[in-house]
Amino acid sequence: MASKNESILIMDFGGQYSQLIARHVRECHVYCELKSYQISAEEIKSSGYRGIIFTGGPNSTYDENAPKCDPKIFQLDIPVLGICYGAQLMAQTLGGKVRSSDTKEYGKTEIECNTSSLIFHAAKEKSICWMSHTDYISEVPHGFKITAISESCPVAAMEDIKRHFFALQFHPEVNHTQEGMLYLQNFLYNACGCTAEWQMDSFVKETIKSLKITIGDKKVLCALSGGVDSSVAALLVHKAVGKQLTCIFVDHGLLRKDEGDQVEQIFRKQFDMNLIRVNAQERFLSKLSGVTEPEEKRKIIGEEFIRVFEDEAKKLGRIEYLCQGTIYPDVVESGTGEAAVIKSHHNVGGLPADVGFEGILEPLRDLFKDEVRQAGLELGIPEFLVWRQPFPGPGLAVRILGDITEEKLDLLKDADAILREEFASAGLDRRVNQYFAVLTGIRSVGVMGDGRTYDNTIALRAVTTDDFMTADWARVPYDVLEKISNRIINEVPHVNRVVYDITSKPPATIEWE
């Protein structure tokens, strides 16, 4: 891919913001890859990276088991930017000193920077940034000069302009750092010489071209969930090989209101795909009957999804390729080197690679979620599907606390549809990152008309987030919440109470189960 000619390596030292760095580099239209700090200088050299970014991390550089990079990296004549732990590691490796600080810096901090520095070009002399460190650089290496300070940090930034080495003790990638994107752009464009080649229209065209060559005249099978990842992956393959692709849409009955019909309408009629819709609601509900434990629900749904998919695949005869909607966070979230494992991913319901396929196609493997959406728009997928709310694989089964029944599903679908309609009407559907209704399993006393009721409680959940690893509850206007509550109670049978969840993540998770 031509747009990968300008590639940045992000070396992960276990920092919680590592993916955020990568996303922001991509937002600057520069391709980047997130890899373990254990990568060798030889591999870096052969890959032709334009620049390297060291991420933060939880360790102290002087700890016995602290992650260290190959010191030969500093001899490759490639610009390097160290962030937080990465800055301290750069200092220590090149002969500087790092010490534990008596004054810990955490949170918003004012820095004073030298605007003649390459990194701080066109920046303000004083600005707010996000600090998160207990150690500090007490002595800079030979050839470096200090380019920023804070009240408690004598080296908030340093650079060796001759060798193009730069270090920031703070985190430019988080929103709290006011001019963080400018600092990253200065590194990418001015230090590394990148020219913003990473464009989504090029990615789409070149991916379709590559898929044509890879697939040839062979057949492809795709599990289509209707979510943006599997939809974009399927459409890329369809654009490449047309009717050689068959999509299986397993409708387990746990989707949101009318979603199954919408998926079928778009892909069968608008895009003329080979689409098999398997209406398996009764089969799934039978398996879930009486099950209340969330993890057991997930396992049953995942296992049954595989069984249904395999049953349908066998009817189609020999198919050489399986297409999956794997995206970049799925690849890196399972851990890079010594970095902590966030979670393991099993795409499309955990489909096994040994079902008899010749190969696996993952056309979105290099993309973050926001890039997948851009690709979807380039391909002509309707906006409402591209911007579809994040939805758990087990669907509404984990938004119904307790056992699953058809009656409960119908009730929650109606309540959730009202929530989504009113958010769209109020212009909140793009401003709030995730929102949904939960059937809590709680029944309470109410008064409706002249009679006493004892009915269900619906909880509304809405959050704002940049990365879904942390999230804050959304400050939804009271009049919007009031309208949603009134509509649910008046239009959805057997609901007499609506509550709003005002818990952030952490301590809560976004989903209730």
Image (cartoon, grey):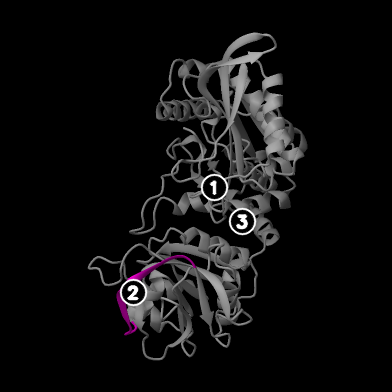
The x and y percentages for residue 325 are 56, 44
Disc 2, SS: loop
The residue where tag 3 is placed is: 210
- Compared to residue 440, the image places residue 32 above or below, namely below
Say if the magenta span includes residue 358: no
- The circle on residue 472 is 1
- Compared to residue 375, the image places residue 477 above or below, namely above
Disc 1, SS: strand
Of label 2 and label 1, which has the lower sequence position? 2
Q: Residue farthest to the left?
A: 64
Q: Quadrant of the N terminus?
A: bottom right
Label 3 vs label 2, nearer the camera: 2
- The circle on residue 273 is none
Q: Residue at x 44, y 40 (%)?
A: 353
- The circle on residue 70 is 2
- Compared to residue 64, the image places residue 257 above or below, namely above
Of label 1 and label 3, which has the lower sequence position? 3
Using the rendered view, name the quadrant where residue 187 is placed: bottom right
